[in-house]
Image: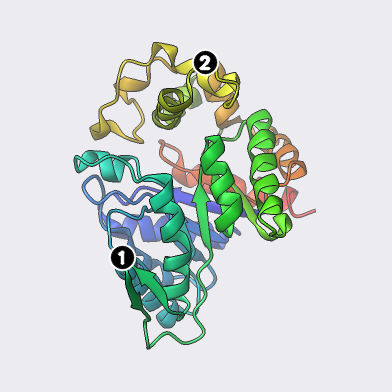
Amino acid sequence: MDFGLVLQTDPPASAVVGLMRRAERHGFRYGWTFDSAVLWQEPFVIYSRILEHTDRLTVGPMVTNPGTRTWEVTASIFATLNDMYGNRTVCGIGRGDSAMRVAGRPPNTLARLGEAIPVIRDLAEGREAVVDGTPLRIPWVKDGKLPVWMAAYGPKALALAGQKADGFILQLADPFLTEWMIRSVRTAAEEAGRDPDSLTMCVAAPAYVGDDLAHAREQCRWFGGMVGNHVADLVSRYGEHSGLVPEALTEYIEARQGYDYSHHGRTGNPDTAFVPDEIVDRFCLLGPAQAHIDRLRALRELGVDQFAVYAMHDAKESTIDAYGEQVIPALAD
């Protein structure tokens, strides 16, 4: 199993670079960041510094979207980083939650996202693609490589990930939901004539190593609110008891009142008080290192190839160190 570290690009950028360097020293292979231009600093600028100051880390957004930047710009940015640092990027992509809504725009449609995925990949790898009716090719790309992994929750999005993406990003670590969603992605890939084993399965969630569960829950409760934004979209689209989305995912948002993106992804977010302890425990990895190891072994059995640690809490360094010293070696067997 591979491991990634997910950060927000809060200033100073040097702190983000430092944490990524620390993660690489401890055996993490991927460095991810949020991508929301108004809320945080521009991640692609910071990726250049991370790549310069690491040797093996692969970096990318968790996640970008096809609306914030034009597709040829997104592809050119990735291709430039790859040319400079040797194909060490990955494109995590989704419909766009905070990045679009903070700017007053709705998230992209799945149709738009499905069109963007192969175009961005083709352009970044030097092939011709059509952007809004115009054939384009980036002529200076040589031997470029850009895997595109799609974030998804609902049935149509899961199917799209299986049909078009190189990997699937699931932002929660509940084994029941993980099994259901990975099966959906694999089924869609197979029905599209693709090899389902060729897709990388990535689970991303907060991880907090320590014995004080009550404190860890308060540090990570924000995550249930972030996931709740996507779940609310699913409920509005499919209905609360449609049978198309597991009630294990939808039931907990009944008390959700709204969401202020100024607190997005932040410990103490007042809009996440509705998230019960049970959801925090199911969606996140909390407790001593052995509890993390046990959950990750179960996820690996379900087909998870990478676990990406959301480190938006007060124990970033100690969690990275605990993973490097105890968790990652245990999952190397």
Q: Horizontal placement of 11 versus 54: left or right?
A: left
In this view, 159 is above or below 245? below
Q: Which residue is mark 1?
A: 132
Asked whether residue 286 appears in the rendered view, the answer is yes
In this rendering, the count of numbered labels is 2
Residue farthest toward the right in the current orientation of the protein: 333
Mark 2: which amino acid? Glu
Sort mark 1 into few (<14), some (14-19) or many (20+) by Cα contacts within 10 Å: few
Residues at marks 1 and 2, CA–CA distance in whole angstroms: 40 Å
Which image quadrant is residue 211 in? top right
Q: Could you tell me which residue is drawn at 67 percent across and 32 percent down?
A: 175
- Counting from the top left corner in percent of width and height, residue 61 is at 41, 56
- In this view, the residue in front, 62 or 148, is 148
Q: Is residue 227 above or below residue 50?
A: above
Q: Which of pointers 1 and 2 indicates the residue nearer the eye?
A: 1
Instruction: Tell whether 110 sits left or right of 147.
Output: left
Counting from the top left corner in percent of width and height, residue 48 is at 35, 70
Circle 1 SS class: loop
Q: Position of residue 305 (x, y in %)?
A: 67, 52
Q: What type is the residue that disc 1 sits on?
A: Asp
The answer, for residue 276, to whether it is visible in the render is no
**Which circle marks residue 251 in the picture?**
2
In contact (CB < 8 Å): disc 1 and disc 2: no
How far across and how far down the image is residue 29, in percent?
Answer: 57, 61
User: What secondary structure is found at the residue carrying circle 2?
Assistant: helix
Q: Residue at x 46, y 80 (%)?
A: 127
What residue is at 43 percent from the left and 79 percent from the top?
128
The first of marks 1 and 2 along the sequence is 1
Residue 301, quarter of the rendered image = top right
